[in-house]
Image (spheres, helix red, strand yellow):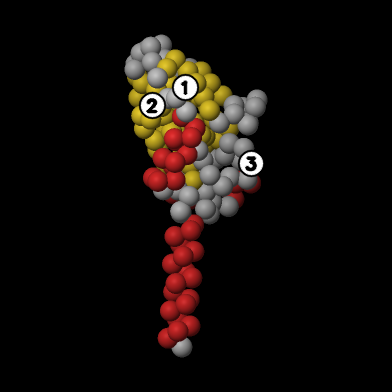
Amino acid sequence: MKKAFLILTMVIAMMAQDSFAQCNEKTIKNEAKISLNDYTFESMAFKPYSEFDNKKLIKAEFSTFSGEKYRMVNVCQNFLKPIIINIYDANNKLILTNKYDNSIDTFDFTTDKSGDYVIEFIISSEDAKNVKNKCVAFVLGYK
């Protein structure tokens, strides 16, 4: 009986670890190294999808400096459908989107002025129904 309990406990612990293994700093940083290429890593943000209140529209802010070249990389993980990504400048003007080509995960842009930019993730209804083992994440680099 003790042996069965121990095995069951180990299996549950491994499942819990595996369910968020993809949404951790080490994994995101590894993705960043590959995706940023010749851009210098500046920052990243990531969070398990299950922790968001609004499951269909997720927004995050990041700061930029005027005249800099940036690369924003979508490193979301385990979504069944492509995520629509919109990036808005400091004036809340849409500057980049993958709405018409969902295969785009890397966005290069130059900022006109310093300020807070917004990245918006629009999640499919299908993915919003099953929130397990998904990670919302992006990486920002500059040149």
Which mark, residue 27?
none
Q: In terms of depth relative to the viewer, which is nearer, 126 or 97?
A: 97
In the rendered view, does 2 fall on the left or right side of 127?
A: left
Which image quarter is the C terminus in? top left
Q: Is residue 62 visible?
A: no
- State which mark lies toward you, 3 or 1: 3
Vertical comparison of 52 with 15: above or below: above
Q: CA distance from mark 3 to mark 1?
A: 22 Å
Q: Residues within 10 Å of mark 3 (few under 14, many from 20)?
A: few
- State which mark lies toward you, 3 or 2: 2
Which mark, residue 81?
3
Q: Earlier in the sequence, mark 2 or mark 1?
A: 2
Residue 76, x across and y down, in percent: 51, 40
| Amino acid at pointer 3 | Lys
At a point 35% along the width and 24% down the height, the residue shown is: 63
- Which residue position holds label 2? 40
Residue 4, x across and y down, in percent: 48, 83
**SS for tag 2?**
strand
Total numbered badges shown on the rendered structure:
3
Q: Earlier in the sequence, mark 3 or mark 2?
A: 2
Q: Which residue sits furthest bottom?
A: 1
At a point 53% along the width and 54% down the height, the residue shown is: 132
Pointers 2 and 1 in contact (C-beta within 8 Å): no
Vertical comparison of 69 with 136: above or below: above
Residue 125, x across and y down, in percent: 62, 43
In the rendered view, does 40 fall on the left or right side of 120?
A: left
**SS for tag 1?**
strand
| Amino acid at pointer 1 | Tyr
Q: Earlier in the sequence, mark 3 or mark 1?
A: 3
Which mark, residue 88?
1
| Amino acid at pointer 2 | Thr
